[in-house]
């Protein structure tokens, strides 16, 4: 059974930091593109960042560039999202996702972890 399990969410003040983790199990994810998405109350789910299988190629939403960093450890089947200089508008449920292809839809999704940034 394929599973993606996010952790590391919580409540933090404006300007603070959090590191999210996503542990994958049930198959080998080392060749997958891994991504982070978020959904704020009343809003559509939006792309945050993704990372190709090698960890060399990454992309970010404009709203998080320079503040968030995505990384992965293929030996641990885990992807991370380091979030710095957090703002209240970063408050959302953050989801991890994986896809087998470099482009296209994501095949697997986690349950999400709540991040709340207080002003």
Image (spheres, grey):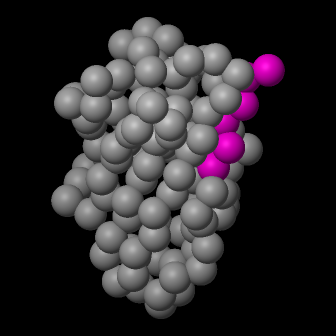
Of all residues shown, which one is farthest toward the top?
A: 101
Q: Which region of the structure is painted magenta?
A: 1-6
x and y percent of residue 65 in the render? 23, 54
Q: Which residue occupies 56% across, 45% down?
A: 22
x and y percent of residue 57 in the render? 22, 29
Please, is residue 117 above or below residue 7 in the view?
below
Please, is residue 103 above or below residue 36 in the view?
above
Is residue 66 visible in the rendered image? The answer is yes
Quadrant of the image containing the N terminus: top right
Marks counted in the figure total: 0
x and y percent of residue 32 in the render? 45, 19
Task: Describe residue 51's horizontal placement relative to residue 27 as left or right.
Answer: left
Q: Image quadrant of residue 23?
A: top right
**Main secondary structure of the magenta stretch:** strand
x and y percent of residue 69 in the render? 30, 53
Of all residues shown, which one is farthest toward the front?
A: 75
Q: Which residue occupies 63% across, 49% down?
A: 6
Is residue 44 visible in the rendered image? The answer is no
Q: Which residue occupies 44% across, 9% down?
A: 101
Q: Is residue 98 magenta?
A: no
Please, is residue 32 above or below residue 87 in the view?
above
Q: Nearer the viewer, residue 7 or 112?
A: 7
Task: Describe residue 32's horizontal placement relative to residue 109 as left or right.
Answer: left
Q: Nearer the viewer, residue 117 or 25?
A: 25
Please, is residue 72 above or below residue 10 in the view?
above
Q: Which residue occupies 38% across, 64% down?
A: 83
Task: Describe residue 40's horizontal placement relative to residue 2 as left or right.
Answer: left
């Amino acid at each position: 059974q394929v599973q993606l399990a996010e952790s590391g969410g919580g409540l933090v003040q404006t300007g603070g930091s959090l590191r999210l983790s996503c542990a994958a199990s049930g198959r080998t994810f080392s060749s997958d593109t891994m991504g982070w998405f978020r959904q704020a109350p009343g809003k559509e789910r939006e792309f945050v960042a993704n990372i190709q299988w090698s960890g060399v190629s990454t992309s970010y939403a404009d709203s998080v560039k320079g503040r968030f960093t995505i990384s992965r450890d293929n030996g641990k089947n885990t992807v991370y999202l380091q979030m710095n200089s957090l703002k209240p508008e970063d408050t959302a449920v953050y989801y991890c996702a994986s896809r087998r292809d470099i482009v296209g839809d994501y095949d697997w999704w986690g349950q999400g972890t709540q991040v709340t940034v207080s002003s």
